[in-house]
Image: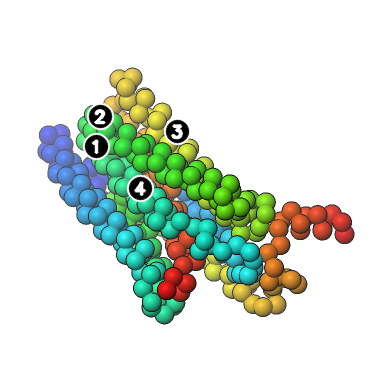
Amino acid sequence: MGAIQLFSKNVSEAGKFHTFVNLALFMAAITGIELVIIFIPFANWITTTAIVFLSVVKFFGVIFWFMHLTYDKALLTFTFLSALVIAAGTVTALLVLHGGEKTIPIGGEEEISSVQRIEDFIAV
Amino acid sequence: MSDSAAATHGHDLTATSTGIESKKLLMWLFLASDCMFFGTLISTHLVYRKMHPFGPIDPLKIFDIELTTFSTFILLMSSFLMALAVSAMHKGQIKSFRKCTLGVIFFGLIFLGCQVYEFYEFVMIKDLTIMNSLFGSTFFVLTGTHGTHVAIGVIWLVCMLMYSYTGKMTHDHALDVEVMGLYWHFVDIVWLIIFPAIYLIEFVGKTY
């Protein structure tokens, strides 16, 4: 029984090896595409969408195969994706909340150094 | 995890009520919290970038996109080697584990070297510091925090590699290697977000 388990384990790990190699090559290719795509004169929204999509593909490639989520219990996937949803929600909410023109501070078109801001605050 | 997958990993899963090893669950919870931490850092950078789009800082002149792409590639390959190291440990192949771990350390150091070079260039040549602009503040805090994570990962890898030479490391330590691997992969995926969100996005529509 032990020998059978060891055999199946080695076969499984050998299968993973090929998956890892293919995934690594795939992600290296995607990184190259990302670099090239920003130099191609597409509309900005197309380029941005493509970059975001390719990054998401790489992201999920790593967490599901390199990090073994696809081989592990669903609870781990749920745990991590919950945090990911909260993080993505935070990013989206902040970008939306601070996206309006009214949120730009007076003189916002000029780069204000953080040191200057602190000095102004202290002076007030 | 299915029964066959559980057998594959070769650990006693009856030890916990969740069926997941405590170390692994704890690491995933830590990574989940770290995910939210980096989420706030990235959003802080993006929000300030949006609020102050007309500052004296021109990211196109500052960022070296070829170098950053190279760093991304290096980190991806280190992640690949890390996956192989974990796989080797599950098979009980210590020598293979050592080779792969050494490769991960090597790639990790290359990444850190690229980041140190980038920071040096920004501060000393291109006059972008953590103090002289909001862009600099958020950029250095974000990438610096990530770099610190990478450095911690490299130290952890070196410790694990040295431990493997004591002769005490056996197949039973596969879980420890797997947990270390999870941390390293997480460092990689954070960079996979930082790279497009901070670097690539600056070049969209401005390179032609």
Disc 3 on helix, strand or loop? helix
Q: Residues within 10 Å of mark 1 (few under 14, many from 20)?
A: many
| Residue B114 shows in this picture | yes
The answer to whether residue A28 is left or right of residue A51 is left
Q: Give the mark, 1 or 4, whose residue is nearer the N terminus.
A: 4
- Say which amino acid is labelled 1: Ala
Callouts 3 and 2 in the same chain:
yes
* Rendering coords of residue A95 (x, y %): 58, 70
Disc 4 on helix, strand or loop? helix
Q: Quarter of the image for the C terminus of chain B: give it.
A: bottom left
Q: Nearer the viewer, mark 4 or mark 2?
A: 4
Do tag 4 and tag 2 residues touch (Cβ < 8 Å)?
A: no
C-alpha gap between disc 3 and disc 2: 19 Å
Q: Quadrant of residue A44?
A: bottom left
Q: Give the mark, 2 or 1, whose residue is nearer the N terminus.
A: 1
* Residue position marked by numbered label 3 in the rendering: B155
Do tag 2 and tag 1 residues touch (Cβ < 8 Å)?
A: yes
Q: Give the mark, 3 or 2, whose residue is nearer the N terminus.
A: 2
Q: Nearer the viewer, mark 3 or mark 1?
A: 3
Callouts 4 and 3 in the same chain:
yes
Do tag 3 and tag 2 residues touch (Cβ < 8 Å)?
A: no
Look at 28% across and 31% down and name the residue there: B98
| Residue B27 shows in this picture | no
Callouts 4 and 2 in the same chain:
yes
* Residue position marked by numbered label 2 in the rendering: B94
Callouts 2 and 1 in the same chain:
yes
B43 or B133, which is in the foreground? Answer: B133
Disc 1 on helix, strand or loop? helix
* Residue position marked by numbered label 1 in the rendering: B88
Say which chain tag 2 marks.
B
- Say which amino acid is labelled 2: Ile
